[in-house]
Image (tube, helix red, strand yellow):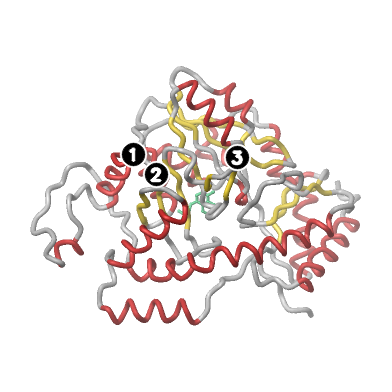
Amino acid sequence: MNEPIPLFDLNFGTEEEQAVIATLRSKWISSGPNVAELERRFADFIGVPHAVALTNCTAALHLALAGVGIGPGAEVIVPSYTFVATVNAIRYVGATPVFADIVGPSDLCLDVRDVARKITERTRALLPMHFGGWSCDMLALTALAKEHRLSIVEDAAHAPGVFEQGRMLGAWGDVGCFSFFSNKNLTCGEGGMAVCHDDEIAARMRLMRSHGMTSLSYERAQGHATKYDVLELGYNYRMDDIRASLALVQLEKLTDDRAARARVAQQYREAFFDMRGLTVPFSERSGSSSHYIFPIVLVEGGAVRRDAVRAQLRDAGIQTSVHYPAVHRFAIYEPYTTALPQTEFVADHLITLPMYGKMTSGHVSRVVGELQKALVGSSTVA
Ligand SMILES: Cc1ncc(COP(=O)(O)O)c(C=O)c1O
């Protein structure tokens, strides 16, 4: 039996171990100097004045929506083809998610024409998600937002370090939200970041991440503050210094890791170029990506055949996944269901293949070969 090929692999080395040990030895493990340093470096990296480190991207999405003033009665247009957290965050602030479709199998990002159709007098924000690290059509979405006076919160969980037309993803909207969850390109186990241009939005997010309190315990321990007031009903969404020290090392590695992923993606694309029976999303794009995941979409057969293909790959030692089941099909989102034909087709036909920077060309060839066998073997299941 060949060695198993996982869906993703951590890009950790001794640098991460040393960084964590140094933080433990410093004896300040909650939010402190590492968090402040990570915020400075991440803001510089994205090219924005403010970065607010948080417990995860879900918290970032929550505070971003609260920060731009979204609340009960507001509608927010969002893809159903995303991780459920993107949509849950809209509910946290009491607003209503309105689902828009994706373009289709060749482009898994929001269809701007459908977004335009879904705008009503109650719409207050757009929440695009940059699928797999590929940009939504930000020029068109920004124009639409301007015309209708809407805020934009970008879900850039998949997309750290992606330049799109001279601007980093996450820096296009009012707030950009990133995830440092364990399978992300930049990880510290659990973590997130909200970035923005506006001083007031940043101040509000900072306040709300720590119970609405006017000072942090690190500031008080340093003698920079002696007391605090509570100005708003906030949360405990603080990142700790152990995670921040890990994330600082990962940030340094991000650009090289992306280049390694791009090579893996290129090998997949060349191998799939003339393979029948599947579409490689985004293969017609000239822009760049974080290459967070490598999805393919089968052209036919529905979820039954897709699951049979995945089972065959699993039996060959290859881990796959489905990014994502459509959110509007989950029980709690039934009341928000609307016609989303492209989302439903892709949700039933997509397979996420293994992708990580250290994948060898031998690994990629094995995935491609096993996939080809599985496609031929399952072509009559439909
Ligand atoms: C598109 C998207 N949005 C939001 C999230 C939530 O991120 P976190 O796990 O950091 O809360 C994820 C995490 O997987 C995601 O993929």
- Closest to the observer, 259 or 118: 259
Which residue is pictured at 87% across the width and 50% down the height? 381
- Closest to the observer, 125 or 88: 125
Residue 33, above or below 286: below
Left or right of residue 307, residue 150 in this image: left
Left or right of residue 31, residue 379 in this image: right
- Amino acid type at mark 1: Gly
* CA neighbours of label 3 inside 10 A, class few (<14), some (14 to 19), many (20+): many
The reply to whether discs 2 and 1 touch (Cβ–Cβ < 8 Å) is yes
- Closest to the observer, 136 or 8: 136
What is the C-alpha distance between the residues marked 2 and 1? 10 Å
* CA neighbours of label 1 inside 10 A, class few (<14), some (14 to 19), many (20+): many
Residue 136 place in picture, x, y as percent = 60, 39
Which residue is pictured at 64% across the width and 57% down the height? 291
What is the C-alpha distance between the residues marked 2 and 3? 18 Å
- The residue that label 3 is drawn on is 136
- Amino acid type at mark 2: Cys
- The residue that label 2 is drawn on is 196
What is the C-alpha distance between the residues marked 3 and 1? 22 Å
Task: Identify the image quadrant of the N terminus.
Answer: bottom right
- Amino acid type at mark 3: Cys
Q: Residue furthest left?
A: 226
Dot in front, 2 or 3: 2
The reply to whether discs 3 and 1 touch (Cβ–Cβ < 8 Å) is no
- The residue that label 1 is drawn on is 67
Residue 102, above or below 367: above
Residue 88 place in picture, x, y as percent = 45, 42
